[in-house]
Amino acid sequence: QVQLVESEGGLVQPGGSLRLSCAASGYTFSSFWAFWVRQAPGKGLEWVSTITTNGGTYYADSVKGRFTISRDNAKNTLYLQMNSLKSDDTAVYYCVKERIYSYDYWGQGTQVTVSS
């Protein structure tokens, strides 16, 4: 069955960095796009980034220039490198498998808290 397991998030000071990873299994990882989606406290879901099967990347304006999505198809792993973190980046982050350009399976989510 499809499984997406995010790495542990954590508490980071403003301006700091953190890398999230997401281990995928149960499907051909390299054949599907992948997304990072987040949910801040008391808010709805917010798309963060997309990576296509050939490595094309897209970012929300709120994270452009600070976050980098990448994938290692040999390791079936998705990454999100987050730099220059702000308090507004505090959220639960989810990795999501694509199906027909839409959200399909979701990871369990990992908490990222940006605070001094």
Image (tube, rainbow, N blue to C red):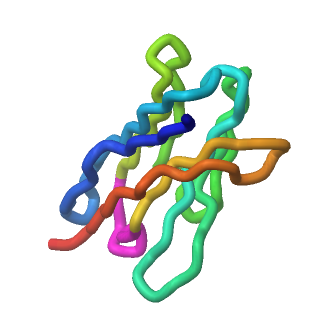
Q: Answer with left or right where residue 57 lies relative to residue 11.
A: right
The residue at the point 33 percent across, 73 percent down is 87
Q: Nearer the viewer, residue 50 or 98?
A: 98
Q: Quadrant of the N terminus?
A: top right
- Residue 89 counted in the magenta span: yes
Q: Which residues, given as a range, are shown in magenta?
A: 84-91
Question: Furthest-top residue in view?
Answer: 74
Quadrant location of the C terminus? bottom left
Q: Is residue 22 left or right of residue 17?
A: right
- Measured from the top left, where is residue 2 in percent x and y? 56, 37
Q: Residue at x 44, y 17 (%)?
A: 75
- Determine which quarter of the picture holds residue 26: top right
Residue 14 is left or right of residue 59, and the answer is left
Q: Quadrant of residue 53?
A: top right
Residue 76 on image: x %, y %: 49, 22
Considering only vertical position in the picture, is 87 above or below 23?
Answer: below
Q: At 55% from the left edge and 52% from the top edge, which residue is drawn? A: 106
Which of the pair 55/83 is nearer the observer? 55
Q: Residue lying furthest front in this view? A: 1
In the foreground, 106 or 64: 106
- Residue 67 vs residue 93, the one in the foreground: 93
